[in-house]
Image (cartoon, grey):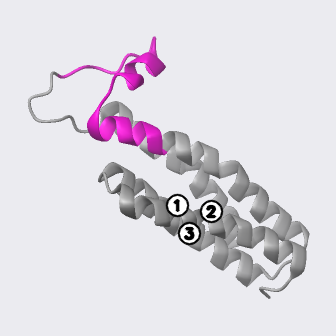
């Protein structure tokens, strides 16, 4: 199996990692401990602040980014783009997404935006490789 397919699996799991931090991650010093409410998880998550709120936002963004990336990989493979090129772009996407999540959790918005752009650009690159072959 090509590396890009493993990257699709990793991209699918990244939001779940963010979910874990959102539900069970650190609290602010002195903050009253609250247990995750699985009966009304969206309301509970909406009331969170700090790293938990940012982790929840990173989770949502990761779910939003996933379909574009997965489709890009599939289209590039179906169009017989060079596997090494697809793999490289997929790895860049995963590294960018991990960096994006780290920036979100660390509350680094000025760094987070360009890192997001690298991931988004990777998705576009997959389609360009498939459509034009110019990156071969």
**Badge 1 element:** helix
Read off the residue under disc 1. Answer: 116
**Badge 2 element:** helix
Q: Are marks 3 and 2 in contact (CB under 8 Å)?
A: yes
**Badge 3 element:** helix
| Boundaries of the magenta span | 33-58
- Local packing at callout 3 (Cα closer than 10 Å; few below 14, some 14-19, many 20+) is some
Q: Are marks 3 and 1 in contact (CB under 8 Å)?
A: yes
**CA gap, disc 1 and disc 2:** 6 Å
Read off the residue under disc 3. Answer: 118
How far from the left and from the top, in percent, is residue 53?
36, 35
Describe residue 71's horizontal placement relative to residue 122 as left or right.
right
**CA gap, disc 3 and disc 2:** 5 Å
- Local packing at callout 1 (Cα closer than 10 Å; few below 14, some 14-19, many 20+) is many
Q: Which mark is residue 120?
A: 2
Q: Are marks 1 and 2 in contact (CB under 8 Å)?
A: yes
Which quadrant holds residue 27?
Answer: top left
Describe residue 42's horizontal placement relative to residue 71 as left or right.
left
Image height check: is 117 above or below 71?
below
């Amino acid at each position: 199996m090509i590396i890009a397919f493993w990257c699709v699996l990793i991209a699918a799991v990244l939001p779940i990692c963010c979910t874990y931090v959102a539900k069970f991650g650190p609290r602010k010093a002195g903050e009253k401990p609250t247990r995750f409410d699985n009966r009304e998880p969206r309301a509970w998550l909406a009331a969170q602040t700090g790293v938990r709120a940012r982790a929840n936002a990173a989770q949502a963004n990761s779910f939003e980014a996933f379909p574009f990336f997965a489709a890009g990989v599939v289209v590039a493979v179906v169009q017989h783009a060079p596997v090494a090129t697809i793999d490289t772009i997929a790895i860049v996407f995963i590294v960018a997404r991990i960096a994006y999540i780290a920036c979100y959790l660390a509350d680094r918005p000025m760094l987070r935006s360009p890192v997001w752009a690298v991931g988004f650009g990777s998705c576009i690159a997959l389609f360009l490789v498939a459509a034009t072959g110019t990156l071969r």
